[in-house]
Amino acid sequence: MIITHKRIPRRTILKGMGTAIALPMLDAMTPALSGSAEAKAPVRLAFVYVPNGVIRKDWNPKTVGKDFEFMRILKPLEECKDDLFVLTGLDDYNGKTLGDGPGDHARAGASILTGVHCKKTAGADIQGGVSADQIAAKEIGSATKLPSLELGCEDSRTVGNCDSGYSCAYTNSLSWRTPTTPLPPEVNPRLTFERLFGTIDTSLAPEVRARRAQYRKSILDMVRDDTQKLVGTLGSSDKRKIDEYLNSVREMERRIENAENNNREVTPAIEKPAGIPIDFLEYAKLTYDLLLLAFQTDLTRLSTLVVGREGSMRVYPEIGIPDPHHPLTHHRNNPDWIEKIVQINILHAQLFANFIKQLKATPDGDGTLLDHSMIVYSSGLGDGNRHTHEDLPVLLAGRGGCHFKPGRHIVYKQGTPITNLYMTLLDRMGVRPEKIGDSTGMIDQLT
């Protein structure tokens, strides 16, 4: 990092016509030769969720410790080995039946971050728990523009029966602000982008928003004057960072606009939410990129990203799989079906690996975004065929502010609640609840 005598506040934003853009960490935001708390990069926490479990024989490493080898599903993450943990043995006890009969997908989604067994109902009287991300948001959310950011790559209704008498709110929402208030993910990248960097009145009718969009200028054009004034005060290193950052934002706008145009061309007679790419790979990459930008600009430090909702029926023609995901997971040991599930699991791992590489390539304070992040990648089911809630597939990427020592496969004692992991992660953020759902304490070995 280059020490300069120019100093601008960490909260500097670029303004213009109702729009505000936060900036990435710059050298000029760090006091020269200072050890103040402001100079220390914040720790971010995200939960990435993939649905319907995985094929465990192609997931679980055969050895423990540093010298483990990735199995087929996790092969895309080999380059990231030194920056992540594979955690085996963590359970979600409250996703189990516990006398309530079928509905494992709904219970998995509702309990994975809460550690609470949800009430079986398809009505308005839903009852779950407060999720780990929202426990943290209550404590530290006021430090950022958005207390938390809920993202998703698959739309679903939040009312009605989605799984054997369980409300769709359970299968569609990882985050719960209160036991009766789920926070469904935003699945439209355009609206996410506007929420992060601009203003939009979602109460307006779609045709009114579309008409107004014709007059909407590029967010970057709106703030051009502020940008030029700021750049003139910065050193060469910061000028380069600003240029790279603004280019990434403009590229994001271009991709979203292309997605909107493609949707209109392909389905002219069907109204679709603007900004949702037809191609799943582009959709997922765009959503991951929005999360990266949100963390990079410190607009939020907490997020959930639902790659697919529990019980997902998504098809994957991009990799030659026209069959819906969920039915495939009930493979009855059919080798062809199992192979298709493995390919879907690998695709999800590839997308996550790309995100981790981007975090590592993004400078942040005295390190990278990955150094200052904790990214949990998991599913609420261990084995989708048998609907098991034990030994969940869990990865933890990042160093939590250079505190964790990744690059290892750790096996925990049978019956260890996954909420114990969350207790440990929240502790790194300075959030110390008495418990999270069924937690019994914190886990060890991460340091």
Image (cartoon, rainbow, N blue to C red):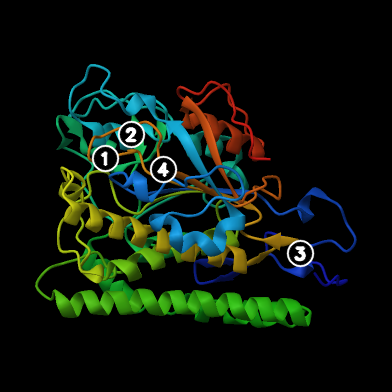
Return the residue at label 4: 393
Q: Which residue lies furthest to the top in this view?
A: 99
Evaluate whether residue 23 shows in this view: no
The residue that mark 2 highlights is 110
Nearest the camera: 193 or 90?
90
Q: x, y (%) of residue 244?
A: 60, 79
Tell me the crowding category of disc 3: few under 14, some 14 to 19, or many 20 or more residues within 10 angstroms, Cα based: many
Amino acid type assigned to the residue bearing label 4 in the image: Pro
Where residue 55 appears, as percent x and y from the top left, is 31, 47
Instruction: Please tell me whether mark 4 or mark 3 is closer to you in this view.
Output: 4
Identity of the residue drawn at 19% across and 53% down: 335
Which sits earlier in the primary sequence, circle 3 or circle 2? 3
Q: Do the residues labelled 2 and 1 touch (CB within 8 Å)?
A: yes
Judge from the rendering whether residue 55 lies leftward or rightward of residue 160; answer left or right: right
* Mark 3 or mark 1, earlier in chain: 3
Q: In this view, does 237 lie to the left or right of 107?
A: right
For badge 2, the amino acid type reads: Ala
From the image, state whether disc 4 or disc 2 is nearer to you. 4
In the image: residue 7, left or right of residue 41: right
